[in-house]
Amino acid sequence: MPSCESSNNNTQVGFTTLEGFSFKEVLNSDITRKSIFVLLEKEGKNAILICDKQPFAESAAEAESWIRGSKMNLLVENDIYGNYEQEIPAHLNGVKTTLIYPATEKHILKYRAQDRYLIAETGDDYDKITLPHILESNLSVQWVYNCLDHKSEQDRLIFEDPDEHSGFQLYPDLKWNGETMENLYCQALVRRRGIKSVRDLTADDIPLLENVLEKSKKAIRERYGVNPAQIKAYFHYQPSFYHLHMHLVKVNYDAPGGSMYAIPVEVALGNLRIASDYYKRATLPFMGKALDPLCQKFKAAGKIDF
Amino acid sequence: MPSCESSNNNTQVGFTTLEGFSFKEVLNSDITRKSIFVLLEKEGKNAILICDKQPFAESAAEAESWIRGSKMNLLVENDIYGNYEQEIPAHLNGVKTTLIYPATEKHILKYRAQDRYLIAETGDDYDKITLPHILESNLSVQWVYNCLDHKSEQDRLIFEDPDEHSGFQLYPDLKWNGETMENLYCQALVRRRGIKSVRDLTADDIPLLENVLEKSKKAIRERYGVNPAQIKAYFHYQPSFYHLHMHLVKVNYDAPGGSMYAIPVEVALGNLRIASDYYKRATLPFMGKALDPLCQKFKAAGKIDF
């Protein structure tokens, strides 16, 4: 999907409306991030409108401007606290929007809200349900191998440790613009193949994790000037692809992906020191969407009730 | 701090401006939640303006209204994707605001951005740094005992298991309005005193955790009609107060508090089954603010570098 970060021209030229599009339904909404996904229709064809309220402008000049332009409607006052409904002029209260038109059924399925369920996967569940599912699904990680073999994305590479056993490659995450340090987001791909997720880790992998953690933080300090103590590093479970990779994010930033998926690398290291087979035996919860095939399999096995 | 959830009257009566207040600085900003904290001044006294962009209105009538009223400025178009800058009329694009005036230095410190650091606390660090800090600080949990002894907040109680060993009380969290199921947020206080945090848990506490988890989910289903498979339950580390309590939240909702603090209850149960003394030995990361006394103590001990 294309994106545009560079345009700051807020001229009236080119303004239009959504006339001709009729409202069908709200597909989904994110009340934390203040986003919404709406299904529209025009001339018998579907459209999806994705709206995302922008953060408040923080520079002194911009902040003065929207504060000065605001109207305040007092709701409740108590001692030193006043609660207001505030109206900021529309052109100072940006919304970034994408319109997909015409949109296919696949687009609609992608953006429509799905019920999500907490699945507490035991080691036994992994062996009987999840691992067979991963093997059957035959999900390709060819793009990862292309990176590791220097066949693609080499212009994006931040750092590489070429050691075949404990080496890795560090890239900026695709969701990061590479510039604002507040939401710094990098990803380390381990060189060694066959470690699908934390489930495959044993105490033998402690040197690998320590190496990736330490050298990635060092590379981030050198490239971006960020203090290693301000980087949080974690694995996701379930991961979005089954080749071990580490997320490295600025501590203040809540990256999308959901809090319950994140296993801090320091926790993983501690766990492997407590028991080498920790990840064979641990209960690892993850969030499943109702229509996910893996979620369906847990349902069929009587492990969740929906 | 007072809040007002009920007012929907958007009449022009009562509208005012922030005239007389001058801009001093942006204290902090939350780019994920689209909030900002600004320091203002009026007649030599400080004021804090807390602005929070509201989620998009989702009802069909409201959504039609802000879509129809929007102006769209095309930035980039590619195939079926168009990227726009969207302007929504100010009265349909709400901002909820609190003004604190006059504000004290303590208010300013509370709202000012502080650098945060990841502290990977080992079992040894807990014994030598964190536990002495907790004991010295002598932090009162009298308000918890008032709840458990039925002296306060009893009108808010959702469910109680009075058993002295494995019992608990379940309340709606103060951050939840008690009505929108999308961000359901409850808190269970265990009856037993002296369990300061997960660090004090052993395999003997497995029945306690199972009891709180199971009966809380059941009570939430009965009171609010939410499927137990759609509730995520977790402990925070460090907790905000040192009397064991469990957070229970709707799965889709990213509650404030930061992803790295959350230990899912199913994970804690699994850990205690793997090793009864797991929480004596585990590495538990937490986020420390630069000015926090505990963070300062880790710094003094040479455990973090800032």
Image: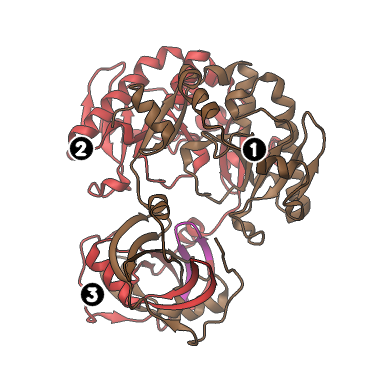
Chain colours: A red, B brown
Quadrant location, the N terminus of chain B: bottom right
Decide if residue B13 is on the left or right side of residue B305.
right
Residues drawn in magenta: A27-44
- Name which quarter of the figure residue B278 lies in: top right
What chain is tagged by disc 3? A
SS label for mark 2: loop
Foreground of the two, B247 or A283: B247
Q: Residues within 10 Å of mark 2 (few under 14, many from 20)?
A: few
| Gap in angstroms between the C-alphas marked 2 and 3 | 33 Å
**Image depth: mark 1 or mark 3 in front:** 1
Please identify the residue farthest to the right as the structure is shown: B162
Q: Which residue is mark 3?
A: A10
Is A171 part of what is drawn in magenta? Answer: no
Please identify the residue farthest to the front as the structure is shown: B44
**Image depth: mark 2 or mark 3 in front:** 2
Return the mark for residue B245: 1
In x, y percent, where is residue A192? Answer: 34, 21
Is A29 part of what is drawn in magenta? Answer: yes
In x, y percent, where is residue A237? Answer: 49, 34
Q: Which residue is mark 2?
A: A225
* Three-letter amino acid code at the position of disc 1: His
Does residue A42 show up? no
Measuring 65% from the left and 28% from the top, which residue is drawn there?
Answer: B195
| Gap in angstroms between the C-alphas marked 2 and 1 | 38 Å
| Gap in angstroms between the C-alphas marked 1 and 3 | 50 Å
Does residue B220 show up? yes
**Image depth: mark 2 or mark 1 in front:** 1
Dominant secondary structure (helix, strand or loop) of the stretch shown in magenta: strand
What chain is tagged by disc 2? A
Q: Are marks 1 and 3 on the same chain?
A: no
* Three-letter amino acid code at the position of disc 2: Gly
